[in-house]
Image (cartoon, coloured by chain):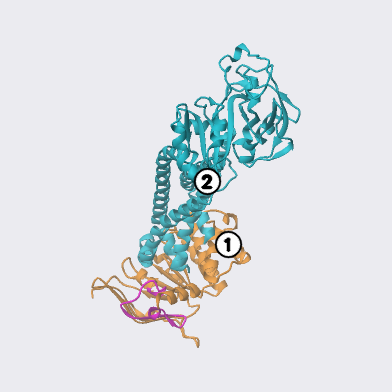
Amino acid sequence: MIGLSLAYLKDRGLNTALNILLLALSVASLVILLLFSSQLENRFDKDAAGIDMVVGAKGSPLQLILSSVYHVDIPTGNVPLDTVPLLRRQLGVAEAIPLALGDSFRSFRIVGTEPAYPALLGASLADGRMFAAKMEAVIGADVAARTGAKLGQRFVGGHGMSSGDDGPKHEETPFIVVGRLKPTGTVIDRLILTSVESVWGVHGIEDPGEDHHDGESAEDHEAHAGAAEVTAVLVRFGSPIAAVRLPGFINRQTNLQAAVPAVEVSRLLALVGVGLDAVRAFAVLLMLTAGLSIFVALLTALKEREGDMAMLRVIGASRAAIIGQVASEGLILASAGAALGLLLGHGVIGMAAASIEQLRALGLNAFAFHPGEALIVAAALGIGLIAALIPALRVLKTDIAETLANAR
Amino acid sequence: MSSPDTLIGSNTAQGPLVEARGLSHVRDGRTVMAIGDWQLQAHAHALLLGPSGSGKTTFINIVTGLLTPSHGTISVAGEVMSALPPAARDGLRRRTIGLVFQTLRLIPALSVTDNLALAQQLALGQVDRAAIAGMIDRVGLSHRAAARPRQLSQGEGQRAAIARALITRPRLVVADEPTSALDDANAARMIDLMFDVADATGATLLVATHDGRIAHRFANRLNLMAPVAA
């Protein structure tokens, strides 16, 4: 009877193809939303793992988190270097890691920090060693893959965080790659890490830790010249008391603000979530429409096929076999729609990641599957089955003799 | 009203293939078919002749178990069809009866070959491709074996329907108006074919028609008259 179902579906090929496409579009929409939101959330969680609080210049706390944890926005400003020892002195602070931002190389951000930063994100060296001296750099796995940079490679950073190669260059202060990190699946894969002192050096800022300096201050970097500052400080708490006490303490400092990644991310996701919910509702509506379309198609087909059904009964098909045959038509449609939808959904995610830099930066992966996809497929199959069963059950009520008499 | 005197087939030791006892059917207070007692012996092909509304289709529906008679019983191959529960009727029909209808009742989505294969699968639980090819050849449709029913001419479609009814090797082939849409030559050819194939497969024909052109081909006739009042 499956063969008969396939023959019927093939017999009205255009109708079948359109129904499959309609269902596939709804499945694809739901799959894209699911993959996008789950991968985004997962990425947010992974990137912020171990970072309990970020301290930076006053401004938008979300901007502070986006710029210093996820490296996708511009910083709120700089804070005095004293902030780092101030935080380290606080009770309950396990770690305080400075970040100095401002430059990039081929759109990859150069981050002045300490070796504790890659350690905090669970990154380890693939080869080479950790940066130590000024102008030494360790590059993330994506940076290595995309730029092809080897150990010993020299490169010149450009001013700005996403200008790529178009902005002004720091030609006189090249970096040298001394180490490359293993892939981590976090934002660090896309970063170039160096010491805070290197970033100061590039911008002609004197290192307060050095006894002597040449006082050089390039005219191009006048804006940066001045007292040694850092962009933000990532803080890991050693005790829960710090989580309660420290943010308030920091926010009372005139120039500082503290932002908690978990709070800001959940606020961001709630904002994005409203939009996602609307699109999700639309996709569900689309799926119901597809179900209705399959229902109408099968109902119409079965009305035309009442004589066939009666004939099948006459030549030996049981009622169960007839219902099974109709149900299998719905299921075949739904299965094909679901399979095509999955393929389409993952394909769109893959194409989006391949063509949109920001999405690739967020770590969108077409080959990652989410358990929720099984639910979407089950829903599509369920809709196909219900859409088929309602007309199929009409067959039960059909009077074969009368149908045949009418059809003769 | 029936005329029982014209219906007699010879009795065999095995008993009649079809046997009606006191058979009549009333619908909405009106007697739409009244046959009484009648027997059809194996291989004694019979013609059910009568004008429209005389109850031919009602009788066929009762013989094939699609309808339960108001009065009397009908037995097929020794089993009382009218007394069986629906599933058992389906089984008896599947095992014993092949049906040919006036209009093409082939599955339009399947080729001629696949229509026969489906009938075999449903009735016998298996498909014998060689037998199907042989049957299609016998009805002269080898060149149309892969064609869909809608691609066949009226005559070709009827031949395909006969092949489909006989491919399960039923003991009884019931045909409802198999020739009424055909011209004289094709009607004669159709009846020849039905006799040939039925004889070759050992089937017995029960043909219902108002088509007087084929009446002379049957020695065994059951004449139904116009409807009678209850």
Q: CA distance from mark 1 to mark 2?
A: 87 Å
Q: Is residue B187 visible?
A: yes
Q: What segment is highlighted magenta in the picture? A: B62-84
**Residue B164 percent coordinates (x, y):** 52, 64
- Whether B65 is among the magenta residues is yes
Is A353 within the magenta? no
**The N terminus of chain B lies in which quarter of the figure?**
bottom left
Q: Secondary structure at mark 1?
A: helix
In the rendered image of this protein, does residue B17 appear above or below residue A407?
below
Residue under label 2, please give it: A239
Q: Residue furthest bottom?
A: B13
Of B209 and A110, the residue lying toward us: A110
Which quarter of the picture shows residue A352?
A: top right
Q: What shade has chain B been given? A: orange
Instruction: Please name the color used to draw chain A.
Output: cyan
The x and y percentages for residue A191 are 63, 32
Q: Chain of mark 1?
A: B
Q: What amino acid is at disc 1?
A: Ile
Instruction: Point out the image quarter for the C terminus of chain B.
Output: bottom left
Q: Which mark is residue B136?
A: 1
Chain letter of mark 2 equals A
